[in-house]
Image (cartoon, rainbow, N blue to C red):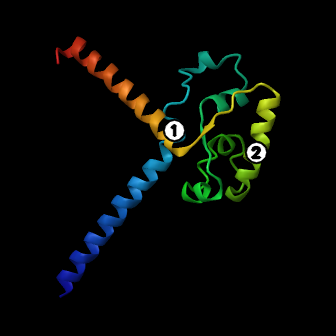
Amino acid sequence: TTLENSNDCIIFLATMYLGYGTFLGLVVITNHIGCEVIEDEESKQGIPWLDIQTRTSRNIRGGAFIHFICGGLNTQVEHHLFPKAPRFYLLRVAKITEQFCKENHITYYSTTLREAYKEIYEELEGNGHKTRERMKATRGL
């Protein structure tokens, strides 16, 4: 029976890690995939640090429930701007940051979780087509 218990434990742990990894992946990919990419340090010249943070990140709207589910990573812009701010203040800070950006004509992007996944899918699909074309050209595939 000890062997059966250890097998159950392994199956349980594997299931938990699979579920946790999938969940974590779904939360983390919403942060930057499909957002603007500034390729190198030379491209960053002349772009204020605040603009770089707001242009290369995305916030997910949805209130306290989404904030809880995403572990605060739905406020990615504020996470970059204020890395030491406690998670439970980030929703308040997001409102202030968004208003500040609006008043100062600074890019600030937030969307719903559904729209974020749609944008991510389109970005990955586009990259897949580019990769396929590159492989055809370079490897004859």
Vertical position of residue 55 compared to residue 96: above or below: above
Query: Percent from the top left, x then y, of residue 62?
Result: 61, 50
* 87 relative position to 31: left or right: right
Residue visible at 81% across and 35% down in the picture: 100
Q: Secondary structure at mark 2?
A: helix
Q: Amino acid at mark 1?
A: Glu
Q: Secondary structure at mark 1?
A: helix
* 62 relative position to 39: left or right: right
What residue is shown with label 2? 95
Instruction: Give the class, few, some or many, for how many residues have Cα within 10 Å of label 2's Cα (few <14, many ≥20).
Output: few
Residue visible at 61% across and 53% down in the picture: 72
* Quarter of the figure that contains the N terminus: bottom left
Residue visible at 75% across and 38% down in the picture: 98
How many marks on residues?
2
Q: Nearer the viewer, residue 43 or 36?
A: 36
Q: Earlier in the sequence, mark 2 or mark 1?
A: 2
Residue visible at 32% across and 69% down in the picture: 13
What residue is shown with label 1? 115
Query: Percent from the top left, x then y, of residue 20?
Result: 41, 60
Of tags 2 and 1, which is closer to the observer? Answer: 1
Q: Quadrant of residue 52?
A: top right
Query: Percent from the top left, x then y, of residue 99?
Result: 79, 37
* Residue 54: assigned label: none
Q: Quadrant of residue 103?
A: top right
Instruction: Give the class, few, some or many, for how many residues have Cα within 10 Å of label 1's Cα (few <14, many ≥20).
Output: few
Measured Cα–Cα span from mark 2 to mark 1: 20 Å
Outermost residue on the top side: it is 137
* Quarter of the figure that contains the C terminus: top left
Q: Quadrant of residue 108?
A: top right
